[in-house]
Image (cartoon, rainbow, N blue to C red):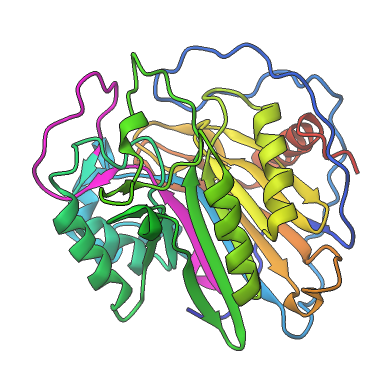
Amino acid sequence: MAHRRSHRAAIAIILLAGTACTSEEPSAQPSYDGRSPSAIASPSPPLEPTASPEPPPEPPGSVTIALAGDIHFEGVLRGRLADPATALAPMTSTLTAADVAIVNLETSVGLGGMPEPGKRYPFQAPTSAFAALAAAGIDVATMANNHALDFGREPLPGMFAAVDRAARGPSPLRVVGIGRDVDGAFTPAFVDVGDTVVATIGATVADQDPTADPTGQWAATADSPGTADALADPARLLRAVAAADRTADVVVVYLHWGIQGERCPSEDQRSLARSLVGAGADVVAGSHTHGLQGDGPLGRGYVAYGLGNYAWYTPTELTGVLTLTLRPAVARTGQARVIDAVWEPASISADGLPSPLTGPDAAGFDAELASLRACAGFVG
């Protein structure tokens, strides 16, 4: 879906070349209570963000991609689905302003089924959730996560029928990372932006505790529906990225990865990000930690390790939308293709929806963002 473009963010950085990513040992994993962790001290001194209240004009032929984190419809958010057209209305402007908007739908969808035995937080939303996402200007939602099959496989036929309807709607929503079989689960969503084709692939590599959060049996197979799971072997994911790179102008990979509660990406995240960029990914983004992690250039690509929560049933101190501007014309030159990265900072309030940060709160977001980038190895 092509949208009118605008930028309304507090911080922007111009990216003309890749920056090397270094590694740090992750700190110990805290216990998880369903809330996003508050900021803790960074192992590296914070950097000064480059403020640019008036980003330069986008070059001809550029494409904007808006990325946001976890969305579900639990708790205070469930009642909003009574009117899907306005369910997420307070958060739509930055998403609709982008050419392509991508989020993680962190819930099972459909009717029926039983909660997965042993699952700590089973989530389920009606199929009207897809209409709510489409009405909010979201073009692609990944369901490759540890909640997609919270109520088993019984609801999946109705869910897949709803996914097909959503893709044919007046504001098409494509769902990735889940499929009727493994090939379908790894199939990209393709969005045309003028003459530019943007491909999005969703996959999960989150290492769950099988005694407290059993999801290992959710992986799609040749004859069983499920999620696009690349935890045990990323080879299929890397092949899917390489295939998409041969046919699309821009390739985005949205992953469910990392360690819940950690603000610094793990070495596994960093290693996989390098492999994905090497395979042809222009943008690698992810969620699962329920808090922000650093973002920055990696070779010819751009990595946003953790996008945090975005519409969630518990308040969250820091969240936001990351809008990337890409120049597809340099696709075969090996140069970095993301030329601008802009955050619209927000926090999730008691109603479950993000509210933009302004003034001192926005300045605090900028400082934390710089710290997170240093922690992730983005130091320039």
In which quarter of the view is residue 173 placed? Answer: bottom left
Does residue 104 show up magenta in the picture? Answer: yes
Question: In the image, residue 108 lies at what x, y percent?
Answer: 26, 44
Q: Position of residue 163 (x, y in %)?
A: 27, 64
Is residue 101 shown left or right of residue 353?
right
Q: Which span is picked out in magenta?
A: 95-123
Tell whether position 358 is magenta. no
Does residue 363 appear in the picture of this structure? yes
In what quadrant of the picture does the C terminus appear?
A: top right
Q: Residue furthest front?
A: 222
In this rendering, would 174 be left or right of 7?
left
Q: Is residue 195 above or below residue 20?
A: below
Residue 111 drawn at (x, y percent)? 11, 48
Determine the residue positioned at 53% across, 50% down: 236
Q: What's the residue at 34%, 30% (across, down)?
A: 215
38 or 264: nearer the viewer: 264
**How many numbered dots are placed on residues in this image?**
0
